[in-house]
Image: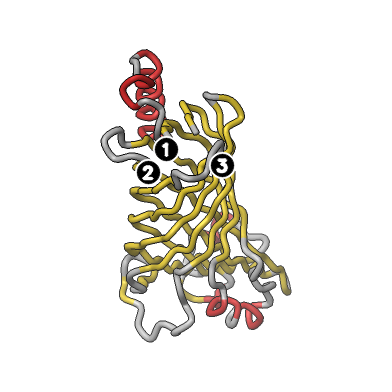
Amino acid sequence: MKRIFCLTVLIFVAFAKLSAQEEMGFDSKFAAGGGFTPGWIVPNFDAINERLPSLGIEKLPSSGIFATGGTGFISIPFIKNLRIGGMGFGGSIKKTSVINRISREVDYSTSMGGFTAEYTMPFIKNIALSVGFIFGGGSNTIEVYENQTQENWDKFWGEDFNIEMPQSGNSYKKLTNKHLMIAPTINIDIPIYRFFAFRIGGGYKFALSESWEYNNEQTLNNIPSNLKSNLLFLQAGIFIGFFNY
């Protein structure tokens, strides 16, 4: 992420010093910049929520969760209205319960990032309406904890400690999924000043695989058909760079 921001800043400085205006004639939309893009993502929690009531844990929200990330891009001088760049973002949520001095918790986290390409509609003036895609990778992690709310030091390290036995009152399980993904996107950039722009947009991620592993990279079989990595996402943020619309 830091490399993306550094690259976009260097590009901005270079174009600000050169006579890019005369070379391009300002007859096409040009932009180079990047910024922080918080947003909202809506993962599919159906398979997880089917299991949580038996643990006494509240279901994860179908409305989605908050995410943070960043985006950087630059227009291609020799292909009018085309931008390329990179982006990444992610979010997490957890739910807990305490029953009979046993604390249970489920943590869900998801992230994605990759190469971006956008085409900015040339017939729209003063703002930039762009359609494009993201191609890259994503990951999901589900962690489930079960612990006694109080424990003695000696007992913690003693024979009773076993992370794979829920009946002991101390258990930890982890599911992971890493996948290639592609996401069509649509974004609107509104210039606040030549060096600042406000972006709002979103897209839908399609995971190109659904293989899951548990604990230390052990194979997980019989995965529910509704355990999907596809998700809807919305983003907004302030970009710093150079913007000519």
Q: Amino acid at mark 1?
A: Gly
| Residue 227 visible, this angle | yes
Q: Secondary structure at mark 2?
A: strand
Q: Residue at x 69, y 72 (%)?
A: 58
User: Badges 2 and 3: C-beta atoms under 8 Å apart?
Assistant: no
Question: Colour scheme of this structure image?
Answer: secondary structure
Q: Image quarter for residue 225?
A: bottom left
Q: Residue at x 62, y 63 (%)?
A: 64
Q: Quadrant of the N terminus?
A: top left
Q: Secondary structure at mark 3?
A: strand
Q: Which residue is mark 2?
A: 86
Residue 202: x and y, percent? Answer: 53, 55
Q: Which residue is mark 1?
A: 72
Q: Residue at x 56, y 42 (%)?
A: 199
The image's mark for residue 198 is none
Report whether 73 appears left or right of 166: left
Q: CA distance from mark 1 to mark 3?
A: 12 Å
- Front-lying residue, 219 or 234: 234
Q: Secondary structure at mark 1?
A: strand
Q: Which residue is mark 3?
A: 199
Report whether 162 appears left or right of 147: left
Residue 98: x and y, percent? Answer: 71, 68
User: Badges 1 and 2: C-beta atoms under 8 Å apart?
Assistant: yes
Q: Amino acid at mark 3?
A: Arg
- Front-lying residue, 137 or 149: 137
Q: Could you classify mark 2 by the number of other residues whose Cα lies within 10 Å: few (under 14), some (14-19), or many (20 or more)?
A: many
Residue 179: x and y, percent? Answer: 34, 64
How many numbered badges does the structure rendering display?
3
